[in-house]
Amino acid sequence: MTITDEDCLAETLAFNAQFEAASATRPTRPRVLDATLLAFLRRNRLGGDTPPVRLPQGQDRVVAGGVKVRAFVPDHVDGVYLHIHGGGWAFGSADGQDERLWRIAEQSRLAVVSVDYRLAPEHPFPAGPDDCEAAARWLVDHAEAEFGTRRLLIGGESAGAHLSVLTLLRLRDRHGITGAFRAAHLLFGPYDLSMTPSQRLFGSRQLLSNTDSIQGSYELFTPGMEAEQRRDPGISPLFADLTGLPPARIVVGTEDPLLDDSRFLAARWQEAGASVQLGVVAGAMHGFTLFPLTITEREQQRERDFLAAA
């Protein structure tokens, strides 16, 4: 484990305090979301109050199985990055981070394919994982014809990191596919949906995610399930056999309720025989890469470097 960006700690903690103070003045989001509120929240950028920017470089497509994806293809392609967005399995979209994904495409020389998977609560588990699995299978079969390369990478943020690991496990267990994806990049994901100690103990601090909001996300994604059911390896990859998975870079902040998830997954990933880098960003809260911080600029550069070299 490497603690990074301690020289930015003062700036990072000051932002956290500002964010927490602003959150305290907003109405508490109800546990049950009606259709109007759900539509409003989905229209806006995660972590903000304005719609995301859609770039003309993004291409909306439908691939095998009727799964929607958004693709970014630079002039020179050395590989394909299957990106899975975050948002607690209920928010976010493939067109929610066009600027970031286009930078990855250009600077890492990758075609980026972002999955617009079905969202809870309308489409709870296993709909989202099914869509990500279908998109991954499509890339395994068609990346060379579509993009001129068989070099595949996978990754995502928060719920997208969770879905990335589930996708790798499904490819291995359902289709006998290992080695097709050469690396995984996993940002602040939840890997134990029965709740790790850091999730349970984080409390009510309003740093984008907390104990109550995490629990609410799990109830939307896996309605009616008890904690023991959520420990199923097909839902919580921390409990899965991780053998045969590719090298990974796992990142989380010290002020993230999902800190234990990344720490525990990194240990199990390494024990299963694959190389892993665990980066813990000093003072960073959940979803910190959504905000204009020095640690965001640094982390996004590290992400692009890892994907380019993997």
Image: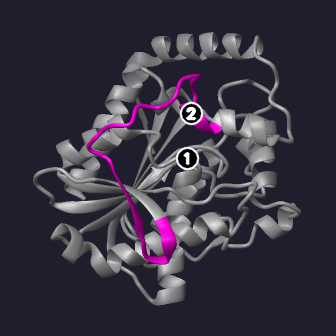
Question: With respect to residue 295, does 84 lie above or below?
Answer: below
Q: Which residue is painted at 18% across and 42% down in the image?
A: 107
Q: Position of residue 37 (x, y in %)?
A: 75, 34
Task: Give the residue type that dot 1 points to.
Answer: Gly
Q: Specify the color scheme.
A: one colour
Look at the image and give the residue range highlighted in magenta: 42-67
Task: Give the residue type that dot 2 points to.
Answer: Leu
Q: Nearer the viewer, residue 203 or 61?
A: 61
Q: Which of 117 and 158 is in front in this view?
A: 117
Q: N-terminal of the two: label 1 or label 2?
A: 2
Q: Which mark is residue 86?
A: 1
Question: With respect to residue 141, does 97 lie above or below?
Answer: above
For disc 2, the marked residue is 46
Spot the residue most to the left.
76
Left or right: 25 in relation to 137: right
Residue 168 visible in image = no
Query: Split into 4 quadrants, where in the image is the C terminus?
Result: bottom left
Q: Position of residue 120 (x, y in %)?
A: 71, 55
For the residues bearing labels 1 and 2, Cβ distance under 8 angstroms: yes
Question: Label 2's element?
Answer: loop
